[in-house]
Amino acid sequence: MLLEDYPGAAVTVACGPVAAPLFADLPGLECLHVIERRPRLGHWRRLWQAMRRQRWQVVADLRGSLLAWTLAADRRLICRAEKRREHRIEELARQLGLPRPPAPTLWLSADRRRRAAQSLGDGPPVLAVGPTANWAAKQWPIDRFQAAVAALTAADGILPGARVAVFGAAGERPAAAPLLASIAADRRLDFIGGPDLLDGQALLERCSFYLGNDSGLMHMAAAAGIPTLGLFGPSPEWRYGPYGERTAVARTTESFEQLVVNNPAFDHRKTDCLMTGLSVETVVMAARALWSGDGRGGLGLLDTDLTDING
């Protein structure tokens, strides 16, 4: 929406190394500062040195850092995380004074879209799957992914005979290997460690459905505008669920509070899978509901009894 308010503006983005590639095709991008952590807050000092000499029409800071207050700016939009039971996108929209939460968007060049079209060709529809996550506790068991994919692409599934595209980082191949091995070679599309993030986004746009754990890839699928089912357990779906009109969530029988907040043994770096309370049957039924349009738009939520939960 800032691009609409400032048409033709030159845009400078500062972000971490993981997110940086997502801005490569941003209209008007003039400079991209990649923030690499340094000792004694050296990364912030370096960024300030790079930005302090310019007067900015608008500075938008989604992290609530002090840096935004030290730059010369005509307008400042500064957001801070609050302890509200509110989706992060809705929180940002409220703090920025937007009339409505914006739909998640990633910008793609025509060339990326052309390459994606050539890569996927004109074969059967594609079910996209993201079977990994950045912590083991958030990863639904891989054998359940195998069963769910088989059900969704069966003759009576939502995408009978579909090809299956498996996405993930290069280092996640061992975790995804059993799923890849379970897919017939003529229907298997292996994108583990393959395309860069925006090329992957162009591929996602051409898929028919996305199934995956709570991860950045899940949010990319939602931004691609395809039906996106996120699987949740030890993370709060009301805060970080996929956002958009064609999204839904299936979560474990246990709540986030039970798995994390009230679990003194939880350590996201060490705790193993906490997703066993989410059955294959629940996920398949949730996918059917979303596919048929029966899932609640915006942030659908399905527990293992397939009961809609408001808020």
Image (cartoon, helix red, strand yellow):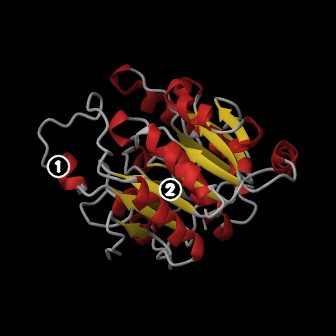
* Between 228 and 91, the one nearer to me in the picture: 228
Which quadrant, please, contains the N terminus? bottom right
Residue 133 image position (x, y, % from top left): 45, 39
Few, some or many residues within 10 Å of mark 1 (<14, 14–19, 20+): few
Residue at x-position 71% and y-position 53%: 162
Residue at x-position 31% and y-position 45%: 276
Which circle marks residue 261 in the picture? Answer: 1
Q: In what element is the residue under mark 2?
A: strand
Residue 274 image position (x, y, % from top left): 29, 42
Residue 83 image position (x, y, % from top left): 24, 60
Q: CA distance from mark 2 to mark 1?
A: 31 Å
Residue 61 image position (x, y, % from top left): 46, 52
* Between 227 and 100, the one nearer to me in the picture: 227
| Amino acid marked by disc 1 | Val
Which circle marks residue 30 in the picture? Answer: none
Residue at x-position 44% and y-position 49%: 214
Determine if residue 163 is in view: yes
* Between 156 and 228, the one nearer to me in the picture: 156
Q: In what element is the residue under mark 1?
A: helix
Which quadrant, please, contains the C terminus? bottom left
Left or right for 269, reference 59? left
Q: Residue furthest front?
A: 155
Q: Is residue 61 above or below residue 43?
A: below
Task: Determine the image quadrant of residue 42.
Answer: top left
Residue at x-position 29% and y-position 32%: 272
Nearer to us of marks 2 and 1 is 1
Are dots 2 and 1 in contact, CB under 8 Å?
no
| Amino acid marked by disc 2 | Ala
Q: Is residue 93 above or below residue 173?
A: below
Residue at the spot of label 2:
60
Task: Determine the image quadrant of residue 190.
Answer: top right
